[in-house]
Amino acid sequence: MKVKGIQRKGLTALTAAFAVSLLLSGCGSNEGSGGSANGGNGDGGNAAANADNGGSNAGSTNAGAANGGSDSLKLEPYTIKWFVPGSAAQKDQALVNEEVSKYLKDKINASFDLEVIDWGSWADKMNLKFASSEPFDLMYTANWDGFTTKIAQGNIIDITSLIDQYAQDAKAVIEPALLEGSKVNGKNYGMPVNKEMATQFGVMLRKDLVDKYAIDITTIKTLQDLEPYYDIIKEKEPGVTPFYLNKDTSLLNVWQNNNFDHYDDGAGTLTKGSTDFKLVMGLETPEAKAGYDLIHQWYQKGYVNKDAATLQDMSGGLKAGKAFSFPEQLKPGKDAEVSTATGVQWVQVELTQPVIRTSDTQGSMASISRTSKDPARAMMFLNLLYTDKTLVNLIAFGIEGKHYKKVGDNTIDFADGVTAQTSGYNLNQAWLFGNQFNDFLWANEDPQKWEKFKTFNESAKNSPLLGFVFDPSNVKTEVAAITNVGKEFNPGLGTGTLDPNVYVPKYIDKLKAAGIEKVIAEEQKQLDAWRAAQSK
């Protein structure tokens, strides 16, 4: 099942925009990066120098299998190693890996080893793996997670020819706008997960407390509309935090999406309704300052947990009932997904309009490491992942009868005696894997979820910068320095812990010392060239 709705509204604009962007030498997306570009380890290699890695380093995959890919007798045994981020390693991961290995044996003669790394240490651990050249095959990649830096350093390989050779079936089911939009310089460095294509932000509210205090969520249109309910929770629900955060979450995603056409505290920002496409330093705008003022006020009022700026993982607090609300990136049915993951029932409140940005086409991908011993086998596996319903659901949801049970043709619930808290395999991150339109639905999810995904995509507006790709190669030293400055200030300012009147000026000074003005000038030059090419 493919999401076709976007083709009527967004595909033409997206593919045309990317056709123009390929005239430039861009290799980094500016959309939605939030200043989180990751400098990584090493001095960086040339991605172009590695362009042929996928085709030439076939490892144990021989020519006969290359043409067919289905005759496992022609393939030597191989173990596919895949790293993904998650809230925690899963107790039954080895059991699931064993079942996947059994399933893959007769298909591509491969064993399977998926490893989950906690979100808090994900970036550092993956950088260390590349620094030590640890052999592995696949990893989660995304625009916000240093995707273009990994390309520039040569740490993930060009897989364009591998897709054509080993994954024609997957290519046929992936939404064309995703596959085209996720390209960098006309090449695929990641296989995009087939899922929703727009971004929307809002909050999750605990359903039992919404019901208890008769909160009409349809009246909540802005962040400020939440304040009377936060006062109620603070007064009447001891032990429950009105607005629960960790060091990486904030109300700022909502604020910035409503007040800017594009915001990036580590590069250029485009103000709302801009017609001259002049990039500015976002932190110097009054709109950005007002957002920091609001979250600081909430912290001072006691709406935010005191440990927010240092808290790594929110999931424990959510499962323990410590939160009334928290900010979240939304899509149709996100509340049901979070309810399943936490064992607590939530309802979602949308506070921004859905927008399709360049980064949304690169929001969740699987990339092949330069250290893979058999990139061709890794691509054969990905081809199955996108087309084989049994495989993708085994990886996403675990073992039938142990982790889940079927309650309908395409509907599952936890296995008897198992809950979200006790399950040995409850990743709740199906958006990491292959083709979501082949996924089972949980019993609490809307049967029309996938149809609503189509409507969601159709209702989204295109970002003014859709298709623009910023190449940071000329300012990579400055980008790395800016990233480190962001790590120093963002947790404290984003959670409201630090007074913006004191620390925003300090943040601005350090960003300027790190070279942000040079980065913005370089980005502006590329944006002007991109717009000029579009108008031809």
Image (spheres, rainbow, N blue to C red):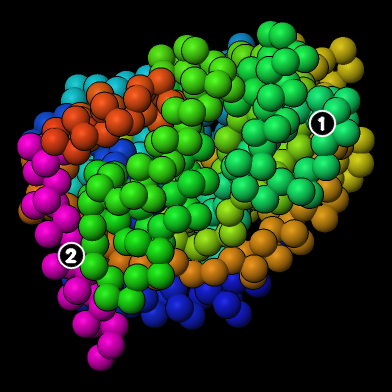
From the viewer's perspective, is the residue at label 1 or at label 2 nearer? 1
Residue 196 visible (yes or no): yes
In the rendered structure, the answer to whether residue 186 lies left or right of residue 66 reads left
Q: State the quadrant of the N terminus.
A: bottom right
Answer above or below: position of 3 versus 416.
below
Task: Determine whether the residue tagged by mark 2 lies in a helix, strand or loop.
Answer: helix
Secondary structure, magenta segment, majority class: helix
- Residue corresponding to mark 2: 524
Which residue is painted at 35% across and 42% down in the image?
A: 289
Q: State the quadrant of the C terminus.
A: bottom left
Q: Is residue 207 magenta?
A: no
- Residue corresponding to mark 1: 210
Q: Percent x, y for residue 63?
A: 36, 53
Q: Which residue ends up furthest to the top in the rendered image? A: 239
Q: Nearer the viewer, residue 475 or 403?
A: 475
Q: Is residue 532 magenta?
A: yes
Q: Percent x, y for residue 205?
A: 72, 32
Which residue is painted at 84% across and 21% down in the image?
A: 415
Q: Percent x, y for residue 345?
A: 79, 28
Residue 82 visible (yes or no): no
Residue 45 lies in what quarter of the image? top left
Q: Earlier in the sequence, mark 1 or mark 2?
A: 1
| Boundaries of the magenta span | 511-536
Answer above or below: position of 445 versus 111.
below
